[in-house]
Image (spheres, coloured by chain):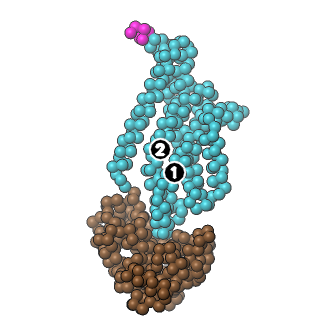
Chain colours: A cyan, B brown
Amino acid sequence: MNNFIDAFYLNFIKDERWKYITGGLKTTLTVTFFAVIMGIVLGFLVGVIRSTYDKTGKLKILNALCNVYLTIIRGTPVVVQLLITYFVIFGSVNINKVVVAVIAFGVNSGAYVAEIIRSGIMSVDNGQFEAGRSIGFTYGQTMIHIILPQAFKNVLPALANEFIVLLKETSVAGYIALEDLTKGGDIIRSRTFNAFMPLIGVAIIYLLMVMIFSYFVKCLERRLRNSEH
Amino acid sequence: MNTNYINGQPLIQVTDLVKSFGELDALGGVSTDIYEGDVVFVVGPSGSGKSTFLRCLNRLEEPTGGKILFEGIDITDPKTDIDKHRQKMGMVFQQFNLFPHMTIMKNLTIGPMKLQDKSKEEAETEAMRLLERVGLADRANAYPSQLSGGQKQRIAIVRALCMKPDVMLFDEPTSALDPEMVGEVLSVMRDLAEEKMTMVVVTHEMAFAKEVANRVLFMAEGKIVEENAPKEFFEHPKTDRLQNFLSKVL
């Protein structure tokens, strides 16, 4: 027991090492939060463009661009994308690493969100489109007032899952020497030569965050199911 | 109503309408005139193109050839703002297609409010008036999933009426209903016909067609084979095709 307390003191208390954890956690949450927003915006746009092409055959060029984007992002590892964003795209400019991480993870997440949104739009019965158009709504109005609200509800669980994945994925931000939660734990390990305590600590924090988030998603899902409208 | 539209001219003038799906010709040149106050029923075997014909009238299906003049305007012209004209052509679907995420009241008022600049009060007063007429005023705050099929279809009719259309298109409005619910929908349609609403109805309800229509079209293989006043149509069919069809369905 004393050993445990000693190890805890060494890894988290001494030299204010807990600040690596709290600082890292803050960075992880910041990056995740803004990357999620970017992913949603990007994903919505791409998803709507792709399903508009699927349904009407319009937006051919935009759809082709979106396809290129999806193929590249989904066909390469996120670490490689992060490195390219930092060392190649922003290689010659002095830029905050948090911003780089937000862009890299946001662009990455957008590709997955896009396919989720598209599947949601395609899952709404075509009769809903026709009903909207028959009243006199334009394609865009039908999309906004009638299709997207239904599509969003259908894909909410999948979207939430994507954000859980994103939260964990930001753990590779250390590759560009961004001090996120994982990197913070790893720095402590390199100082104290004690791997167990900081790494298990980091793992527990991730686990807690995911469990809390999953709990809220479950509540939301239950509410949506109960109000079957 | 459009100012270019001259009284006495047909409300809808269909000339040589063609619709092909790839190799398949769903409509092979259909021409007919629909006048104000007409109640035109379209009957025929399945696959005869009658639903395609109806869906071409408001361009839910894009015609591949021919011309449709609605209130004097060529709506098959790609330059025509079809969304504008669709507001004047109410449509009722076989599968109701109510918006499941909105209350009945919202279903009825979203069109008038977003497209015709009606205030919420105006739109709701009008919706309430129509709901009372079809006997569903008490369901205004329900969601579509809480209604029976017959109620849904009556709401769908009211939703189209809220836009104050000049013509109502019915695409097999009772085909998805349980038999005991058909009557309530037909009675709403009968009332509409009596009020001189212009209607085009695709249906399998022959008895209803005979009772309500002032003209019945028989379609087969993408063409109008025979058309006549209902009494003549059902009692003295001229063509073999129609005689054959009627002998099967009556």
Circle 2 residue:
A158
Q: Is residue B214 above or below residue A144?
A: below
Residue A31 at what x, y percent from top left?
54, 34
Circle 2 Cα neighbour tier, 10 Å, few/some/many (<14 / 14–19 / ≥20): some
The residue sitting at 37% across, 72% down in the picture is: B174
Query: Magenta residues?
Result: A1-6
Q: Nearer the viewer, residue B124 or A136?
A: A136
Is residue A82 in sight in this rendering? no
| Residue B12 position (above or below residue A67) | below
Parent chain of label 1: A
Disc with the residue nearer the chain's start (1 vs 2) = 1
Q: Residue type at mark 2?
A: Ala
Measured from the top left, where is residue A7 in percent x and y?
46, 11
Q: Main secondary structure of the magenta part?
A: helix
> Any magenta on residue A16?
no
The answer to the question of whether label 1 and label 2 lie on touching residues, with beta carbons closer than 8 A, is yes
Checking the image for residue B126, the label placed there is none
- For disc 1, the neighbor class at 10 Å (few under 14, some 14 to 19, many from 20) is some
For image coordinates 44% across by 77% down, the residue present is B202
Numbered badge on residue A119:
1
- Residue in the image at 51% along x and 36% along y: A165
Residue B11: percent from left, percent from top: 50, 84
Query: Which residue is at the far right?
Result: A92
Q: Could you tell me which residue is drawn at 62 percent across and 60 percent down?
A: A58
Left or right: A202 with respect to B211?
right
Q: How many marks?
A: 2
Q: Is residue B49 visible?
A: yes
**Res B29 quadrant in image:** bottom right
* Amino acid found under the numbered disc labelled 1: Ser
State the SS at label 2: helix
If the image is split into quadrants, where does the N terminus of chain A sit?
top left
